[in-house]
Image (cartoon, rainbow, N blue to C red):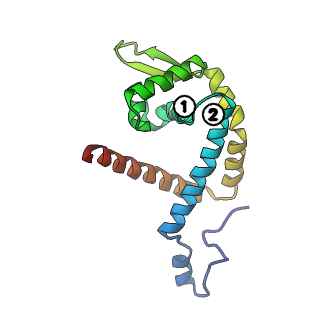
Amino acid sequence: MERSSRDSRTAPADDSAADEATVPDLHTYAVLLRTLNSEFNRHAHAFAQGHDLHATDVHALAAILDSTALEGRPMTPSRLAERLNLTSGAVTACLDRLERAGHISRTRDSTDRRVVHLVYNPGARALARQYFSPLARSTEATMRQFTPEQLATVADFLRTLNQELGTEAARGRTAG
């Protein structure tokens, strides 16, 4: 089942007004994004509690996992501190917990031994994949309801929003 670009529940009678009427306003986007974020956080907190981790640890694991996809390079402790807005001491404590629990390893860069890369260990990655598989199934089921073009638009929107939020965060770090 694919969704049309127009939601029939809100479409007015005339077609030109219909396209404008179905575009959500900023408040609607804010509510939807907060709801999505809350749902992800609920699952992340449950994972943290079930595996004796702090919520920050789960955010760190996600950042380590996503680093290569987002930035094309492995995560480092200093970039993790910046990403999570933590002090170097807080990141060190977080990484120590994750390493003791077997979730990550710290490896030295082969060309510059001063650089430490954070590696999400395969066993821990499999554990997270298994735990979060209901989210993956829900995402896949939802994706099947949209056309490839609609999904590309959603991905573009999320990518652009993340870039804008990152730019805004960087501005805040330099302004303060």
Displayed quadrant of residue 8: bottom right
- Residue 48 circle label: 2
Mark 2 and mark 1: Cα distance apart in space: 8 Å
Q: Is residue 117 left or right of residue 24?
A: left
Q: x, y percentage for residue 33?
A: 54, 57
Which badge, 2 or 1, comes first in the chain's sequence? Answer: 2
Identity, as a three-letter code, of the amino acid under mark 2: Ala
How far across and down, in percent of the image, does residue 100 sit? 57, 17
The residue that disc 1 covers is 57
Q: Amino acid at mark 1?
A: Asp
Q: Find numbered disc 1 in the image and state the secondary structure of the residue it sits on.
A: helix
Among the 4 quarters of the image, the one containing residue 91: top left
Q: Is residue 129 visible?
A: yes
Marks 2,1: beta carbons within 8 A: yes
Horizontal relation, residue 102 to residue 81: left or right: right
Mark 2 secondary-structure assignment:
helix
Residue occupying the point 59% across, 56% down? 35
Quarter of the image where the N terminus is located: bottom right
From this view, report whether residue 78 is shown above or below residue 44: above
Q: Residues within 10 Å of mark 2 (few under 14, many from 20)?
A: some
Left or right of 64? Residue 35 is right
Residue at 53% over, 83% down = 17
Name the residue at 48% across, 31% down: 68
Q: Residue at x 63, y 24 (%)?
A: 124
